[in-house]
Amino acid sequence: MIKILFIRSESAFLPEVDAYIDYFNNIKEFKAYDSSKIKEFKLKDFDLIWEFKGFGGVKKNKNQILIHEYASLSTGKFTTLKNFIKSKFNPKPDLRIFLNENVRAGFKFNDSVEYCYRDMGIDEQFISQGETGKEFDFVYVGSIGKEREMDKFLKVFTAKDNGTLCLVGNVEDEIYNEYKNHKSLIFTGKVPYSEVPKIAAKAKYGINFMPDKYPFNIQTSTKLLEYLALGLKVVSTDYKWVRQFEDKHNCSFYKLDYNNLNFDKNSVEKHKFFSGFKAEEYLWDKVIDRSRVAKSIIEKY
């Protein structure tokens, strides 16, 4: 049996870790563990170490397999430089996993290490939510901070009567203090992941506000997948990945012009939304299956 240790800090969200653990623990050849839920452990007691990469990392012994997963490109200032440093100075693993081709291209690794792609997935509870009474017009799920420019979106949303918006997730103090008393906004703060679909399903429209900037505009939007799985109509900024997704899945979203940002509920309501998205194909088990990572591990072991 191959014992896998997923390295995760207690503060890291990473829903894919829970998905991976469920997936591997249903295969007889594997037993998977989450480092954040083990009080004491020794790396040498595991056959495979799995890291979600920043800088640096653990050093494996010669009998172990090391996996580096790059679920996103670097953000903030000097993103290209950060990507370069990670590609040149991180230890060399036995296998790399990338979110998609865009992420792999951004790191520019120049070696013979095997790699595969693993896109974002959807938890079963987003599909099985069922019909829910609508309590607000719009919902936004995710970090509510200035890095993703949510302050700019809230400014245009609250400029006139656009109905109600429920914001689910951590919110920066400066933004919260400015908008906490606004009658059209409902801040839930951070909630358990199991509560997210229950809350989001109470909206008519899901907001996918993403800056049309590298690397945000070339990476999978998990919230958009979840909105569609819940049957919500999607309002999104217009950027490369969204257009590719619309074409691939025969969808039509209401798109906001990031460079000339405004928001009008009446225009949103007039848009002809449609979606050919098959949420079942994005359940975590199927996404991990398509990555073929389990097969790669067994071959290496």
Image (cartoon, rainbow, N blue to C red):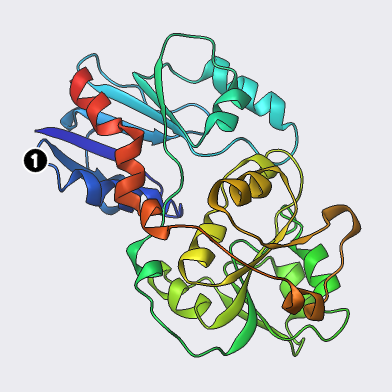
Q: Is residue 126 above or below residue 179?
A: above
Callout 1 secondary element: loop
Closer to the camera in the image, 45 or 53: 53
Residue under the image location 8 percent in, 40 percent down: 28
**Residue beneath label 1, please?**
28
Give the image location of residue 52, x and y in percent: 44, 37
Quarter holding the C terminus is: top left
Q: Is residue 114 above or below residue 230?
A: above
Quadrant in which residue 250 is drawn: bottom right
Quarter holding the N terminus is: top left
Residue under the image location 19 percent in, 17 percent down: 63
* Residue 40 appears in the figure: no
* Residue 141 appears in the figure: yes
Within-10-Å neighbours for mark 1: few <14, some 14–19, many 20+: few
Residue under the image location 35 percent in, 35 percent down: 291
Residue under the image location 34 percent in, 51 percent down: 284
Closer to the camera in the image, 197 or 194: 197
Give the image location of residue 74, x and y in percent: 63, 36
| Position of residue 296 in the picture relative to residue 118 (left or right) | left
Query: Which amino acid lies under the numbered mark 1 shown in the image of this protein?
Result: Lys
Quadrant in which residue 2 is drawn: top left
Quadrant in which residue 88 is drawn: top right
| Position of residue 202 in the picture relative to residue 157 (left or right) | left
| Position of residue 275 in the picture relative to residue 14 (left or right) | right
Give the image location of residue 206, x and y in percent: 61, 70
